[in-house]
Amino acid sequence: MPSLKLIEQFARKNYIPVMLDDTKELLFDTVAKCQPKRILEIGTAIGYSGIVMLSACETATLNTIELLETSAQMARENFREAGVIDRVTIFLGDAREIVMQLTGTYDFIFMDGPKGQYEVFLPYLTDLLEVGGTLVCDNVLYKGLVEHVPENKRHKHITVARNMNAFLHDITTNPRYQTELFRIGDGVTISKKLS
Ligand SMILES: C[S@@+](CC[C@H](N)C(=O)[O-])C[C@H]1O[C@@H](n2cnc3c(N)ncnc32)[C@H](O)[C@@H]1O
């Protein structure tokens, strides 16, 4: 099994975004506690978070969506070396299109894809998530900009921060979810679907 540390080091050296250490621990503990059967992930990158989740639950399967072919190929290799490839299906393409085509349901969803579009995804993810299932979203405080958007930041970051702010409001006030915000890493929400 490739050491997670090695995958992380490779990612950081090559500017491939992977989750921060405290987020990794929270994700591992949450999956270990929930023991899901079917996990959906938006944003595979090179498979780091996927391997974390599958290590936390040895009976779970993972459907994971990645836009970039080079990342998806590296993820496939890392899943193979980690001995979990038989439990993984990688969907290559734009998650906005793929989530609309997925059939079946999931009892755990990890959202770590395009940061400005979580709100667009939420209705689709809600349809795919079983009642009682768990939705984990990373980067919800987006570099600390979500709660205090400064004037002088580049436009792209401000747009993402505003969109993320709208998502954070939605997920924390949506009566179909019970949501807890964790102020670790780049901000993480863990939501249980109630109805
Ligand atoms: C933060 S990284 C994911 C990190 C990964 N979950 C981990 O911690 O190991 C976000 C990933 O989402 C992918 N992505 C961005 N937009 C996407 C889209 N529209 N559809 C699918 N994947 C997308 C990026 O290529 C990138 O690999």
Image (cartoon, helix red, strand yellow):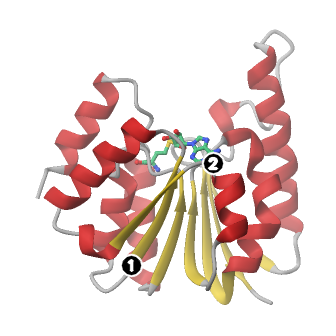
Q: How many other residues sit within 10 Å of disc 2, few (<14), some (14-19) or many (≥20)?
A: some
Any atom of ligand 1 within 8 Å of the CB at mark 1? no
Provide residue 119's location: percent of width, then percent of height. 81, 54
Secondary element at tag 1 = strand
Secondary element at tag 2 = loop
Provide residue 170's location: percent of width, then percent of height. 87, 60
Any atom of ligand 1 within 8 Å of the CB at mark 2? yes
Which residue lies at the image location 63% right of the left edge and 80% below the top edge? Answer: 103
Q: Quadrant of the N terminus?
A: bottom left
Q: Is residue 121 visible in this depiction of the protein?
A: yes
Q: Amino acid at mark 2?
A: Asp
In the shown orientation, is residue 195 left or right of residue 142? right
Q: Residue furthest left?
A: 1
Q: Quadrant of residue 181?
A: bottom right
Q: Which mark is residue 109?
A: none
Q: Amino acid at mark 1?
A: Thr
Look at mark 1 in the image and give the residue it sits on: 61
Which residue lies at the image location 76% right of the left edge and 87% below the top edge? Answer: 194
Look at mark 2 in the image and give the residue it sits on: 94
In the shown orientation, is residue 74 left or right of residue 160? left
Which residue lies at the image location 14% right of the left edge and 57% below the top edge? Answer: 81
**First reached walking from the N terminus: tag 2 or tag 1:** 1
Provide residue 195's location: percent of width, then percent of height. 80, 90
Q: Quadrant of residue 153?
A: top right
Q: Is residue 180 visible in this depiction of the protein?
A: no
Q: How many other residues sit within 10 Å of disc 1, few (<14), some (14-19) or many (≥20)?
A: many
Q: CA distance from mark 2 to mark 1?
A: 21 Å
